[in-house]
Image: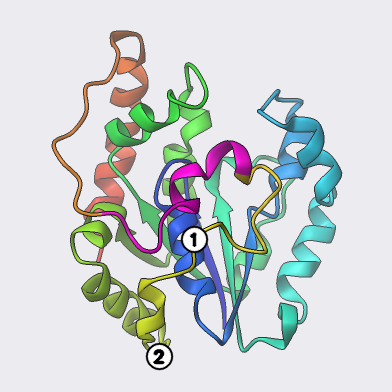
Amino acid sequence: MRIAMWSGPRNLSTAMMYSFGARGDCAVVDEPFYAAYLDMTGLDHPMRDEILASQSKDPKEVEKALLGSNPDGKEHFYQKHMTQHMIEGVPRDWMRDVVNVFLIRHPARVIASYVAKRENPTLEDIGFAQQAELYDQFGGVVIDSHDIRDDPEGMLRKLCDAIGLDWEAGMLSWPTGGHKDDGVWAKHWYGAVWSSTGFAGAEGPLPEVPNELRPVLGAALPHYEKMKAVKL
């Protein structure tokens, strides 16, 4: 089984990759279109040069790898994707040949977390519109990161059942220090999950969003609410 997990940034996506990576039968890949996205847009992200050097910048080559033999001969292949990477020129037809899962999170939480690492995100940066567009085009399973943190085992069992994957209790924990398949950018973004051994506890109240980013929040909310209405 090939599982494509679609989220925006700062959305429990790395912890979910570690969870599936803890399965003995599952290979993982970390944001395989990141270098292509940076190359095609010219955006200046943290560690841009290192990212461009670490991955193929040809989206067609990436597509071929995603549909080729599973890495390490594993039965399943978990692909961590960022919705904002799916710009014009990046192929999408391959999404018909994978199991698509959409990981959502309230945009106030995403924005508050994002600004701690990179200032002034736009709606395009946080991927909510792109996520809703991909769901409309291909469908799939929707799961909310807030629910996972509230009840990791219960929600992961629901997810496995929804996609036809056997449950493994090992998905609830992983070793500290990262995963061998982390992207080169991990040292900038993954500090908290590197020090973790499992999912963080339940989230508190929604954070305050700075006034200058309230328009971004307002634009993202309808897309989130649309996805939330069909979540597990």
Is 178 on the left or on the right of 10, as rendered?
right
Give the quadrant of residue 210: top left
Which is more foreground, mark 2 or mark 1?
A: 1
Relative image position of residue 126 (x, y in whole percent): 47, 34
Query: Which label was assigned to residue 209?
Result: none
Q: Which residues are magenta?
A: 187-200
Give the quadrant of residue 209: top left
| Badge 2 density bin: few <14, some 14–19, many ≥20, Cα 10 Å | few
The answer to the question of whether label 2 and label 1 lie on touching residues, with beta carbons closer than 8 A, is: no
Instruction: Kindly give the residue lying farthest to the top in the view shown.
Output: 212
Residue plotted at (27% across, 40% down): 106
Relative image position of residue 157 (x, y in whole percent): 29, 80
Q: Is residue 148 visible?
A: yes
Residue 185 or 102: which is nearer the viewer? 185
Q: Is residue 40 visible?
A: no
**Residue 177 to residue 203: above or below:** below
SS assignment at label 2: loop
The residue to which callout 1 is attached is: 176
**What's the coloring here?**
rainbow
Kind of residue at disc 2: Asp
Kind of residue at disc 1: Thr
Q: Earlier in the sequence, mark 2 or mark 1?
A: 2
Location of the C terminus by quadrant is bottom left
The residue to which callout 2 is attached is: 166
Relative image position of residue 115 (x, y in whole percent): 43, 23
SS assignment at label 1: loop
Is 18 on the left or on the right of 187, as rendered?
left
